[in-house]
Image (cartoon, rainbow, N blue to C red):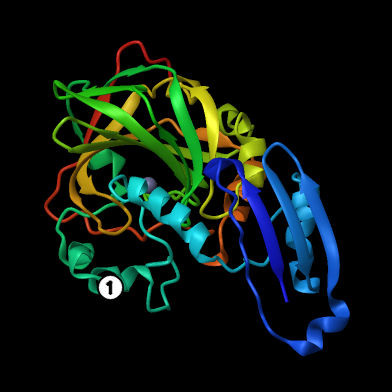
Amino acid sequence: MIIALRLRKTVSPNLVFNLATMSNPNLSPFLFICLMIISSHSISICMADESNEASIRHRLMPGTSKNDMPQTTLVDDRRKTLNRINGVLRDTDTGGEEEFNYIEATALGPKNWGSLKPDWKICADGKSQSPINIDANSAQVMPGDLKRAYIDAPAVLINGVNNIGVIWKGDAGGIEVNGSTYKLVQCHWHTPSEHTIDGKRFDAELHLVHSNGMGQKAVVGILQNIGPPDPFIGNLTEEIDVLDTNEEIDLEKISATNIKDGSKTNYRYFGSFTTPPCTEGVIWTIEAQVRSISQGQINLLKGSHQREFRENARPIQLLGERQIWKFDLPGATE
Ligand SMILES: [Zn+2]
C-alpha cells in the first residue's frame, strides 16, 4: 500500500490529497510509516513499500538524480492540474499526457502519430513537416530576417510529460520576422537535437516558440553540444531537479535574453510543430552557431522524464519541394 498526502504550493490554497493504493498483502512486512516533509513547497506524509524508496530519497535530498525513480500513480486531483498545464502547451509545440511517445517500435511511436487521432493526420501525410536535415551547402542566401527584443516577464517552469519548458505569463517581448512581430510564448528542450546539419545530430536543441496576433508560430531552434554548462539552464537547475512530471513551479521574472546572443548565421525554412498535432505553417529559424550544455544538464533534463520521453527527438522528415535559406545577421559576432 502506498499512501501519499501532499500539499502543493502550485495548487494553493486547496489541500490536495494524492492517494494511490495498491492492495498486496505480501508487501505488508515492508510497509513503514516513513516521511513527513515540511518545507515551503510541500508537506508529505507517506506510507510506502521499498519500491517507492527512491522517490522518498529524492524528496529528502533534492539534488539526488531521479533517473531510476519509479513513477507514482496519478490520481484525479492531480490530473486536473496536469490537464490545465497541457491545455496551455498544446498550441505551442507540445502534446498531451502519454498520448504519444518516441519509441518507434510501439503503438504510440512517431510512425503512428498520424493515425492516433483524426486531428493528427497531418503528422503522417503533411508535406511540410519538421524536423529536417539542413544541407548547409544547398541553402540559398537571403537577406537577414530576424530581430530579437526580449524582456523580463513572469514565467513558470513546467514538466509537460514530453519535455521540460518555461512558459511566460506576461509580455516577454519577441522577435520580428518578415515585418511581423511574434511574441515569445514558451521555450523547451529536446534531447538529442531534432534538426540535423549535414547529417550531424547534436546533444540537445532548445526551441523558443513565438506566436503573432493571428496565432501563426515562429520557432527559433538553438542546437547544443556537450561542453561548459548552459547558464540559462544553470539558473533553473534546482527547480528542474525537484520538478516532477505534470507539475509546474512559479519562477521570478525571467528573460530569454539570458539564453544567449543570436547566431551570426541562421537557417530558415517552413515546417511544422515537431509533436502532435504536427501543425504546419511554422516559420523555423535554426541557429548555425552550436551552443554548449553540460553532460550534467543533459542528465537533469532526461532524468525529469519517464523513460519513453528521455529521448524526445522526432525522426527527420522529408524536405520534399521545400527550400532552405540562410542569412547572416549584422552585428552578431559568432
Ligand atoms: Zn520543440
Q: Provide residue 61's location: percent of width, then percent of height.
A: 80, 47
Q: Which residue is at a point 65% across and 75% down the rendered structure image?
A: 21
Residue 98 visible to the viewer: yes
Q: Is residue 105 above or below residue 154?
A: below
Give amino acid for label 1. Leu
Q: Provide residue 110's location: percent of width, then percent of height.
A: 35, 68
Of residue 6 and residue 255, the one placed in the foreground of this image is 6
Q: Is residue 136 above or below residue 19?
A: above
Q: Which residue is at a point 18% across and 38% down the rendered structure image?
A: 215
Q: Provide residue 170's location: percent of width, then percent of height.
A: 37, 25
Q: Quadrant of the C terminus?
A: top left
Residue found at the far top of this picture = 331
Residue 311 visible to the viewer: no
Q: Residue tagged by mark 1?
A: 116
Left or right of 5 on screen, residue 104: left
The answer as to whether callout 1 falls within 8 Å of ligand 1 is: no
Left or right of 284 on screen, residue 57: right
Q: Quadrant of the N terminus?
A: bottom right
- How crowded pointer 1 is (Cα within 10 Å; few <14, some 14-19, many 20+) is rated as some
Q: Which residue is at a point 14% across and 58% down the rendered structure image?
A: 127
| Quarter of the view holding residue 40 | top right
| Quarter of the view holding residue 231 | top right
Left or right of 264 on screen, residue 47: right
Left or right of 305 on screen, residue 108: left
SS assignment at label 1: helix
Q: Provide residue 234's location: percent of width, then percent of height.
A: 62, 31
The tally of labels here is: 1
